[in-house]
Amino acid sequence: MPMTREARGGRGVDVRTPEMLGTLATHAPRIEEFQFVKFRVEGEVAHMRLDRPDQNLLNERMLMEIAAGINSVSEKRQVKLVLLDSAGKAFSGGIELGEYTQRRVFQLLDAFHSAFAAMMDTSKPVVVVVNGPAYGGGAELAALGDLVIATPNARFAQPEIKLGAFPPLAAAVLPYILGPKMAMELVLTGEAMTAERAREVGLVNFLVPEDKLVDKVDEIIGRVTAQSGPVLTMAKKAILGSLGLPLRDGVRNSMKVFLNELADLEDSQEGLRALVEKRAPKWKNR
């Protein structure tokens, strides 16, 4: 599926024609109107669950809901983390194209762009939980997670090559995550990767038995949300902002964030005081 933003920095690069733009959806759904994403905010965590039986195929409406859910919390100080998981046995079987005419497919592509741009651009860490097949667009959703937790039930595949196509977003993102050789393997063969192999190559951070999944998710949520919200944001910004840059430029970028933004935070000063005073820090998230 087309990615019309640069993977680094979120700068728009629009490749659509005026004719395409006339067909695109313009109104984001309201949270209370969501049909295929179960959304709720509990404390410091925004929970998003893909829920479109049977395979969580990503249609236009579902993709718009993913984007709207993430965007709704991106500027909320009290939310520190977005958790994306799925109902049913599949994480997602990918993009549903069968019901779309040639004209309406541009609306689907725009919704696809909006969902993945939201994941790339949000200041909040995104934790993705995969407990079943993640194919095509579903695998790309998982790949864009900042942290990925999976069980042995998970499978990851980019099967587009078998349909006479290729996944543009995966082709751009996977080399950053896995390196060019592994990205070539996934995209050029279209074969599925086991959860164990995904853990080995770096697509998955944590691999746990299914009966331990809930405990592991709670553990990771606790470990992340125990930190200062704005510091989490700056750390993510420094990491993603350095992707693709030469080492020296990447270091300069990270140091710029550290010196120009981190130093002004109350939480940064509180962290230093707590270290000197040998106590746990009390974050104000500012």
Image (spheres, helix red, strand yellow):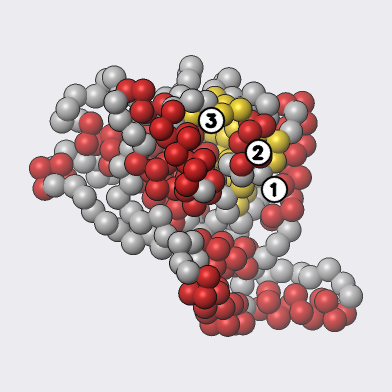
Crowding at dot 2, Cα within 10 Å, few <14 / some 14-19 / many 20+, comes out as some
Specify whether 154 is left or right of 15: right
Crowding at dot 1, Cα within 10 Å, few <14 / some 14-19 / many 20+, comes out as some
Provide the residue designation for mark 3: 156
Identify residue type, mark 1. Answer: Ile
Is residue 174 visible in the rendered image? The answer is yes
Q: Residue at x 48, y 35 (%)?
A: 185
Provide the residue designation for mark 1: 221
Q: Earlier in the sequence, mark 1 or mark 3?
A: 3
Badge 2 marks a residue whose secondary structure is helix
Residue nearest the viewer, comparing 51 with 275? 275
How many angstroms separate mark 1 from mark 2 (CA)?
A: 19 Å
Identify residue type, mark 3. Answer: Phe
How many angstroms separate mark 2 from mark 3 (CA)?
A: 11 Å
Identify residue type, mark 2. Answer: Arg
The mark lying in front, picked from 1 and 2, is 2
Residue nearest the viewer, comparing 185 with 44? 185
